[in-house]
Amino acid sequence: MKKIIIVSALVLLWTAGANAQTAYDAAKLVSKDLNGTARFVGMGGAMGALGGDISTMGTNPAGIGIYRSNDVMTSFSFSTYGTESKYGGKTFDNNNNRWSYDNIGIVFASKIGNHTPLRYVNFGFNYHRAKSFYKNMFMEGALNYSQIDYMTGQANGMLANGVSLKELSDNKLNPYSDNGVGWLGALGWDGLLFDFKNGEYIGVLPQTPYSTFRSREKGGIDQYDFNIAFNISDRVYLGLTIGAYDVDYTKSYYYSEDYGDKQNYNIGSMNRISGSGFDFKMGAIIRPFEDSPFRIGLAVHTPTFYRLTYTTSAYLESNIWMHNNDTG
């Protein structure tokens, strides 16, 4: 299934036309990681009034107006990330280390004059990794319920609303093209994991399964900033940055239930968000007192406007055989 949506980072959670899963995943795009030059990261990004650092073109574009000479910068980072999950008295840790190339930028300083009101016109470009999504999770144990119970509950809920998986399969119709069909219930029915008897869907595996769950997230948001900044009388600095964004985020799931005696099934899904976006940033730095280093920084950012493609797919493999191919 593929859906094209247009969202704004400012009103992401209220975007019309996006289903619940899309809105939840797209909300990940709003926040940003603290990446940039070592100086910028070391100061926690609090350089809005200081300027003079390539990374500031993404926070206060006027900071590039401080430059009086050309500059080139690049930086790397080493990250440790992990998850911890607990179930049935067991703790499952999944820790990973990762090197990443976070930042490269350049500034061209163009001097206009020493005594003219406009002293410098500077141009800058900066790439940095705005967001990383790398995370893995693993958990397993004996559950006191089965996902098949949820599948049958979903199928019966659809039946109450006039949507019958049995009739769809009898008529050889594709259930996945019907917006009234829940995918999990449809996959369970196609995988012969539950039956239809006496006017309702029922599961026929009373045993408690041993379940395994894995998930993996990867990808990120790359940000490209293009900047122009002005130095006016060494007292007022103005800047404008146009930001371009490239989004590539993938999350995959794997879940299995083992009932023993070679009775088992597994289900997996993959969700991907890809696309691009843009925003504008305007800023000013003012030095109100000529003989003082005191500065005031101001910046205004527009929302980030994204055009995204949301793609999802799922599969189910089963070694459990039921009779819905005979009764339904």
Image: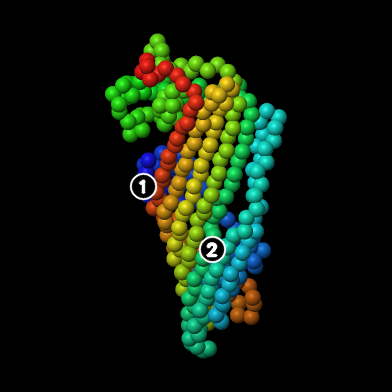
Instruction: Indicate left or right for 52 with 161 as reference.
Output: right
Q: Which is nearer the N-term, disc 2 or disc 1?
A: 1
The residues bearing labels 2 and 1 have C-alpha atoms spaced at a distance of 26 Å
Q: Residues within 10 Å of mark 1 (few under 14, many from 20)?
A: some
Q: Which residue is mark 2?
A: 128
- The amino acid type of the residue labelled 1 equals Ile
Q: Secondary structure at mark 1?
A: strand
- In which quadrant is the C terminus drawn? top left
Q: Nearer the viewer, residue 174 or 126?
A: 174
Residue 194 found in image quarter: top left
Which labelled disc corresponds to residue 291?
none
Q: Residues within 10 Å of mark 2 (few under 14, many from 20)?
A: many
Which residue occupies 65% across, 43% down? 94
Which labelled disc corresponds to residue 4?
1
Q: Nearer the viewer, residue 130 or 296?
A: 130
Q: Nearer the viewer, residue 224 or 166?
A: 166
Q: Nearer the viewer, residue 99 or 63?
A: 99
